[in-house]
Image: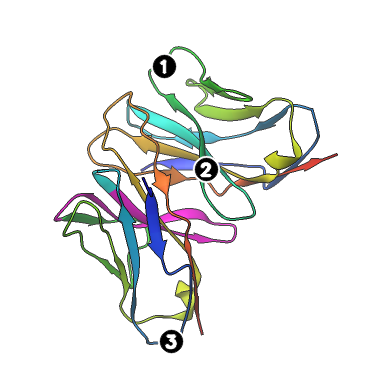
Amino acid sequence: AQKITQTQPGMFVQEKEAVTLDCTYDTSDPSYGLFWYKQPSSGEMIFLIYQGSYDQQNATEGRYSLNFQKARKSANLVISASQLGDSAMYFCAMRSYEGYSTLTFGKGTMLLVSP
Amino acid sequence: NAGVTQTPKFQVLKTGQSMTLQCAQDMNHEYMSWYRQDPGMGLRLIHYSVGAGITDQGEVPNGYNVSRSTTEDFPLRLLSAAPSQTSVYFCASSYAGSAGEGYEQYFGPGTRLTVT
């Protein structure tokens, strides 16, 4: 069974600062992928970034980077230079590549960016 | 491409009523899934499908039924609505992919369902 843990129910950050959202995962599968999604107050789910378990380098997408520490089973999202529009719920999710599988989500972290 | 579409956007049901939430995608994705989102619970998988004619249960399947007769459509049926099924429902689709291929799931806009 897979499990995703997001221990921060809420985070506050000031505009232009960097913030790290924590995510730890548990799986016995050797091959898997880790995803981060953003859900603004309007409700849609927006894909941000992906990291494969065999990727040697940490993934980056613009202001988003994923701090992947495989031995510690963590996949933290780092947002640099926060903007007011980053205020949203953020979900970490995992997908195993063993057989058929779908995404397992964490419970999310609410990020509030203040001016 | 329209992506993943869901209808209706909002629905109010009385306990015991049945209804079907519609989901369609035009990206020729093999995988389609239904999730429910409840406060503090994240998204939980209800049912999923890996192709036309193939469906399987997720984490919270009780009270829901699905079928997949075409690649494009994946309707979710509530058999006899209960207040515990009050939630936001998301449909998602993706390519099947394999190890190392980061095919993200594309989500529909969601259906907000209230059961009274």
Callout 1 touching callout 2 (CB < 8 Å): no
Work out whether residue A110 can be spotted.
Answer: no
Q: Label 2: chain?
A: A
* Residue most extreme to the right: A115
Figure quadrant of residue A16:
top right
Q: Position of residue B30 (x, y in %)?
A: 23, 44
Tell me where the magenta segment starts and ends, as one range: B32-53
Looking at the picture, how far across and down is residue B10, in whole percent? Answer: 50, 72
* SS assignment at label 1: loop
Q: Amino acid at mark 2?
A: Ile
Residue drawn at (40%, 44%), measured in percent from left and top?
A: B106
Callout 3 crowding tier (Cα within 10 Å): few <14, some 14–19, many ≥20:
some
Depth check, mark 1 against mark 2: the one in front is 2
Q: Mark 3 falls on what kind of element?
A: loop
Q: CA distance from mark 1 to mark 2?
A: 22 Å
Q: Residue furthest front?
A: B1
- Report if the CB atoms under discs 3 and 1 are less than 8 Å apart: no
- Disc with the residue nearer the chain's start (1 vs 2): 2
The amino acid sitting under disc 3 is Thr
| Badge 2 element | strand
The numbered dot on residue A55 is 1
Residue that mark 2 sits on: A46
- CA–CA distance between discs 2 and 3? 33 Å
- Whether A42 is drawn above or below B81: the answer is above
In this rendering, the count of numbered labels is 3
The answer to whether dots 3 and 1 both sit on one chain is no
Between disc 2 and disc 3, the foreground one is 2
Q: Is residue B50 magenta?
A: yes
Query: Nearest the camera: A6 or B82?
Result: B82
Whole-angstrom CA distance, mark 3 to mark 1, is 49 Å
Residue assigned mark 3: B15
